[in-house]
Image (cartoon, rainbow, N blue to C red):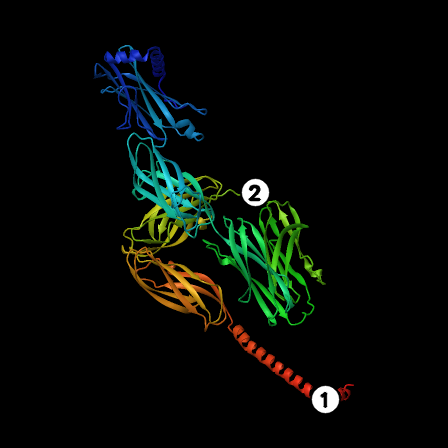
Amino acid sequence: MMKAKPTILALTIILTIIVASLATSQHQSIAHAANGRNVDLFSNKIPCDGRGPNQTSGAFVPQELVIIYTLVTYNDEPIANKLSSFVVTGPANPYQNITIIGVNMTNSSGIAKFSFRVPWPEEHAEEIVFGLWHAIGTVDIADVPTTDHMDFRVGWIVRIKSITTLNDHFEPQTSFLRRSTVIFNITAESIACIPKSGTIVINVKDSMNYPIMFMELDGLTFPVGESYFQASSVIPDSARIGEAQVLTAPYTDSIPNGGVLYSPAVVTTFQIITRDICIQSLVPSETSGQIGDMITITMTVKNKGNQTESFDASTYFNHTIIQTKNVITLPPSAQTQVVFTWDTHGLPEGDYILSGIAGPVEGEIETYDNQFTDGIVSLHDHAPPQTKRDVAITLVTAQPLEAQVGDPVYILVQVKNLGDRPEGFNVTVFYDGFPMTVFHVILLSPGAEQNLTYTWDTSSMFEGLCTIKAYIPPLPDEQNVTNNEYTDGTVHIIAPHPPVEKHDVAVANVTASTGQAFTGDPLGICVEVSNLGDFDETFNVTVYAGTLKIGGQDFLHLGTHLNQTVCFFWDTSGLSPGNYTIWAIANPVPGETNLENNWLTDGVVEVKELLPSIIHDIAVIWLSANTTEVRAGENVTIDAMVLNLGDVPESFNLTIYYDANLVQTITIESLAPNTTLLLTTMWNTKNVEPGTYVLSANATILPNEVNTENNFFEDGQVSIRPYYEILLWLLLIPSLIGLALIALLLLLLLRRRRRKRPTAMLTYAILSHPHI
């Protein structure tokens, strides 16, 4: 309870007046007012100050100064030196009910004044303070207690009541792909008695707390009651997958004009999802075999995205496709195995590199892991010789050899393939017989070594000596297994020293809302500061662009081991074009010794000259071939689609390539704005070497075109098979026909001779055969 400190006499008078006022009905007070006695209770909230009997005042915010006046008159004349009492009660609640009592004398104008600040407790503040407050002013006028009542609300004058996310069709949605548009639907509420002006700021961070969107809606009007606003932005490619956090807050004015918060930020979330598949492994049934063997290849694919996916998976030896299979409805985060059969009949002896490709699926951005190369499969024209299998651990080290509980210990394990064939195997690292980790060595070539590193977290360890050992389970047919185990020695774990309390503030992150801007563009610079020490600290934070001070916050209070993000507005008006290095500094606090982390450089923001109003932007949005495999000499039909994203007609060239080789250059004349055009060309593969080629299309970069990334589009792969397969059949068929004709002619001649010879001579010839 919050109370003023009147004298004992004043308290006695106040209590007497309160008792008298309770004994006197409101009807009597009104009657007395009609008989010339009048008390008018009002506040400092102009124009909604509550003048008149039993009126309502404008609203107040936490910690705001509330001034309440009583105007005391008798027959419309002010009464001076009249003792006036004030009783103010807060809303009823289960935590703390507030009553505030005050007393003062009227001045020569008949006005008594009483003031207090709206309290803001450390716990349950909104439940205790927010709501309807009631004030009573009481004065004894000519021996009659006379009162007036006034209500007022306490709360945030303007607050964000809710924020929801919509898609570009204005439908509610909480999951979005990168590069998609998010519309923020905002409901605000004002408890003021007149419309208020201000700004709404929206700041979005991804799952790694990196800022990805910043919007400022300036020049808004908040009417009394609810109002509705919308803003939109596109999720960048750099956004991390997972839950994004949206912070929305109303300000009294734009940030550059010194606007301050009407109320705390409201937080909502949405999911940034991805369509992403990958190949985790590609394992042949044998790495050395005989020509003609049927080798099975097992591909493990995983759906790393957030949607169920169906896609094609293919395997290759060198650049020749082996087989393609379809993976159907693979759930998110699931993996499956696809088995391919490789028929090696007719292949020449040699080494073959196996590889695989999965997808990509529509909307997939991270396609680097859609391809996988396994290793080498050796094919022989006879059974391969017996191989030697021998893997060994050649070294195990741990650093440091003495560590406090909780300190990291870095363990290095060195393995070597002493055999004469590639090997895959597991390595387990132990301390005192307890396994710490398992390394998976996928493919180690003969004679090759590999270093495996592990960081041992000793937080759960007890004091003592620990023996470090590494072990490889014996391989099938491995004869020498003595080198499969290696013991390093001992690591001494000791009790940690008592922590030393320290003062340490740091700049943890400095982030600009964009890396490029035009002169006059507003930029947001957010600085994340940390208190790494053991004491609550108060310090100053300043952010700079090169030598230019952008802004600062003085007397920032931060509790121990807490972080806080402070955002500043940078108005680039009047800046010369160029690169500006963004950095921030937290002023050292008394007793601080680690000063290296008190400043941090974010990077460079490039400020460019303002672009002309006309936008030039040509994009290649589609490229497709009618087949993925042809024989040399056959034609491939290639379709391409271009789009004019600018606002003037454009003429340009579209050039289509296979790898770095030219297919055709097409000239487009006067493509209208916001218009797409489908182009078709024919690729004659007559003089193309057999192999696999990637198709791409490139549109000419226009003068003053800024967005040039979409001028290039890459489609996929087309495999060209050798043309001599056809020639071989063309040569072989006439040869077979000729041999058949010769054999028929010889048979006819033989029959003719037999008909002309006598029987005795035929018998004699048989008896004279040299083999009888």
Residue 346: where, in percent of width, then height? Answer: 60, 71
Q: Is residue 219 above or below residue 680?
A: above
Left-right relation of 76 to 230: left
Q: Which residue is mark 1?
A: 758
User: Residue 573's spot in the image, x, y percent?
Assistant: 28, 51
Q: Based on the displayed image, in which of its 4 quarters is residue 765 positioned? A: bottom right
SS under mark 1: loop
Question: Mark 1 and mark 2 in contact (Cβ < 8 Å)?
Answer: no
Residue 543, percent from left and from top:
37, 48
The dot on residue 498 is 2
Q: How far across and down, in percent of the image, does residue 2 sit? A: 39, 24
> What kind of residue is marked 1?
Pro
What type is the residue that disc 2 sits on?
Pro
For label 2, the SS is loop
- Spatial distance from mark 2 to mark 1, Cα to Cα? 124 Å
CA neighbours of label 2 inside 10 A, class few (<14), some (14 to 19), many (20+) = few
